[in-house]
Image (cartoon, rainbow, N blue to C red):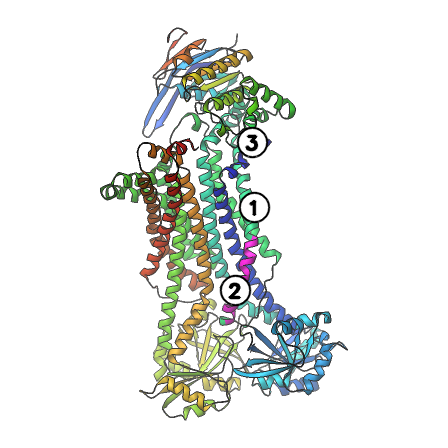
Amino acid sequence: MIPILWKSTLRWPLRRPWQALLAIIGVAMGVAVVIAIDIANESARRAFLASTESISGKATDQLIGGPEGIPEAFFVSLRRDAGIRMSAPLIEGYAITTQQPTRTLTILGIDPFSEVAFRPAMSVAGTPLQNGMAALLTQPDSVILGAKTAAALGVVPGRDLLVRVSGIERPMRVVAVLNDDAGSSSALLNDVVLTDIGTAQRWLQRDGFIDRIDVILHSEAERAILRDFLPTGIRMTTPAQRAQSTTDMTASFEINLNALSLLAMVVGMFLIYNTMTFSVVQRRQLLGTLRCIGVSQREVAVLMLVEGSAIAIIGTVVGLGLGIGLAQGLLALVARTINDIYFVVNVTQIHIGLIPLLKGAVLGIVASCVALAIPTLEAARTPPRTVLRRSSYEEQMTRIVPYIAALGLLGIVVGGVVMWLGPSIWFSYAGLLFLTLGAAMVTPWTTVMLMHALRPLAVRFGGLIAGMAVRDVITSLSRTGVAIAALMIAVAVTIAVGLMVASFRVTVVDWLTTTIRADVFVSAPALNANRLDTALPAGVADRIADLPGVVRIRRYRSSMLPTDRTPVLQIALDVTSADYETFLWAEGNPDQIWPAFANDAIIISEPLALKRDLHVGDTFLLQTTTGDRLVPIAGIFYDYGTELGVVMLPLDRYARWYADDSLTSLGVFVTPGTDPEAFVEAVRTTFPNVALLVRSNAALRATSVEVLDRTFAITNVLQLLATIVAFVGILAALTAMQLERMREFGMLRAIGLDPRQLWQLILTETSLMGAVAGIVAVPVGTAMALALIYVINRISFGWTLQFAMQPEIYIQAALTAVIAAVLAGIYPAWRIARVSPAVALREE
Amino acid sequence: MIPIVSLRAVEKWYDEGAVRRQVLHGVDMHIHAGERVALVGKSGSGKSSLLNIISGIDGADAGTVLVGGHDLNAMNETARTHFRRTSIGFVFQFFNLVPTLSVLENVLLPLELNGIVGRPAHDRAMALLHDVGLADRAGTAPDRLSGGEQQRVAVARALVHQPPLILADEPTGNLDSDTGEQILALLTQLAQQRGHALLMVTHSREVAASADRVVRIQAGRLVDDDRGILL
């Protein structure tokens, strides 16, 4: 194509810099949110895998036991009787430093004699590590740290590090710090506290048990021999399988974050579409002139596409930079949610991989091109006679608006069907996208209808100026329609996410009220807010039961149960007839459930049943210490504690099957009239030197809701980002639209409108647009919320939520729309009121 | 002598909702090379429709349209675009310069569209700008020029690639009478010098008077085709 033709188009953004800036912001923010989520997720996953990998060292296989771990005597037997010399016992736990409570350290208890083959860096002669290893065996509470960790914590060899382990504060004596020049061994110890296995057992209250045994096997034959040697209850796995099944737990969480980030991208796409459509509408006469003098349709299309692509590329590049910055901010939120709900991961720095950047770049450019397609087509089809035959483009718009609305309605129906019948979560999201776009297409028609209905009222109460404002919204539909649709989508997203979070909160609070009945809860401190799987010291339950004022105690034993897929939470508990009403059943008859439960069955949570398509009467495989057992399912209960799924069985049966009589938490019922908080203090006084987490019913509920709110913190941030994208975009779009009408406003000033009347005209018009967007967003946002609550949440997490209709969410969203729209009118109104009519009339 | 424009029994309808309105009724018209023709008539008489058909912007529904030997009705959109590029020069009432291009670039545009680039294109464009009196404003943006100056640039743009036919739609309609006269003189003089046929749609007696021939259209029919009718 010829250079001058290129110039004619590429210089256009320079003449309308605010429009180009708007589009760039739209793309950039959309891309930024998407890659930020990707990078944060990827960084958390990598941090987990890196720590798993470094801790696993050269192990080819791992042996793991039941909830209590592996009896340490088995390790001796493994070496002596099975002759597996290449084996190393390990125990893992977590500690929090008192200086930096947000920093989680992994305690790695090792046997220094067995380490050579597994983690050779730890045994290089003459390194500080080797000297430290000797100290681990000889000095009590001694630890080795990596240089980075030591520097971050500000400790040097010979100094103590104060930490809290299992709720007890204790000093760790740093005997060695690995320098960076020690090579991989330093990296190995990133946020890891290396100590002797005996010390770790004492700290973690795991005397006599180890978590796992790493082994190096050289052949399948060797593997088969070991498998034959393993007693019931000890299983063989590989480091990769273990890490995979752990990271798989966060799949739904990641998908949902990605989907929310894509929503921000969709809003960004609307901005691009809005800007480019606006740009084409403005240039219709210019494009018509070019077509008259012989520029072909293809050339016009290429020009517009290149211009749009240039904006998309700049926006994408800016978005990549912004996204990296945003990822750093989101990382803490992602890591906290993973720690609260799934597993412990310590991640402080982002990992910028090529894949998220490429994905962001491709998505930004592809999304922009999709958004560009319609305006480009419109530009190419601009008839040359536009210049000669001054037919009204707006009239044409008004004519086709009902057809666009009909197409939109079809999109809504298709979206609903796809969402309802689609086999996977991606179909649900595709359905939601159809629904969103369909609603956007119906918006211009709705705008016309609302304006027609409103005009008599506007004239009656607001006079001619208000009537003009109403009419202007309709007569500029090619510009106002898209802007209102974009604002509507942004507001609808705000409503939908707000309603979803509110519904979740209401459901969980109701559920907590039903299920948490005991007056006081006692557990061992744990890092993971959602999993109380640390065993209570022996005898605690009996001593609490003997305290004055106790009516009864309900005992629990929680543990993570490995399955053929992701692990599930197993809760063994006491159930008496008094506890029956704490369960709400999704499937099964309570009259049949409880006898079966007491006999040989288990009950499972709704998310587990939905994710694995399990029903009452089916069986579930429990890998118990005394062997694998296929157990019938007696009932399916509602549960909002964890999306991983819960299996419940009677405590006495658990003790038999797992050869484990430890407990992890207690529910204490006290006599009526006893102050729960006073009882909490009484328990704490009874166990002055035991780390116990003692909370009243009210405190536990408050903590649970707090965890829930923390879980949604990232959702709220993403919602806020999507709203900001929309707000900035709409503000700029409406401002640009009004500024484009300088000449028209100049004419109105010339014929006698005073600045106050112009303010009234412009602000009435933009507020009307905001109001229409707000009104249409109410049903659309509600429909999106219903889809999120009843379809998407159910498929991805397995939760049935109650729909919570909260008027304040609607009011807040409508106000956002109107405020954005009014703000958009302020600058043009201010500017035009200051400019003399003569100057305004000359503006082109 | 073969006419540059030859219309035979041209008809045109427009659909207006359920109603089909005929705007041209069997129009016959010929314009020869170098001839200056004024097309006059009331608003809605069919002037613009006729101009659209002659320029290939719109198609006739019946009849024959031959321009420069091309049968426009037999051409597809791509061919018609190429035809406009090579054979037509446009002067619009509202100038329609490309605001993002300088004065010189606006004039260079048709040349480059026809594959004429570099020094020859530059020299030819500058020569024309000189002829229209704007050589010293070559680097100026169009919005810095007065209406008359913008229309002079438009004249230069219409002539620069030497099309056999110049179509001018109300070329003085947006200018004061003095400036309009100057533009008209410039347009007719340059067209004559270079041998271009010129068809001007106009309401103006002055414009019509400057033509070799005046064609009056009324309700879609050519009612007069003579120099004397307006005088």
Q: Quick check: A60 left or right of A382?
A: right
Q: Earlier in the sequence, mark 3 or mark 1?
A: 3
**Which residue is label 1 attached to?**
A313
Q: Quadrant of residue A541?
A: bottom left
In space, the residues marked 3 and 1 are separated at their CA atoms by: 21 Å
Q: Residue at x 61, y 58 (%)?
A: A353
Q: Quadrant of residue B202?
A: top left
Same chain for the residues under marks 3 and 2 in the image? yes
Position of residue A167 measured from the top left corner of the image (x, y, whole percent): 52, 82
Position of residue B227 measured from the top left corner of the image (x, y, whole percent): 41, 7
Q: Quadrant of the C terminus of chain A?
A: top left
Q: Which residues are magenta?
A: A320-339
Magenta stretch containing residue A335, yes or no? yes
Q: Earlier in the sequence, mark 2 or mark 1?
A: 2
Q: Which amino acid type corresponds to the residue marked 3 in the rendered image?
A: Leu
Q: Quick check: A739 left or right of A160?
A: left
Q: Residue at x 56, y 53 (%)?
A: A320
**Which residue is label 3 attached to?**
A5
Same chain for the residues under marks 2 and 1 in the image? yes
Closer to us: A277 or B178: B178
- Residue A251 is marked as 2
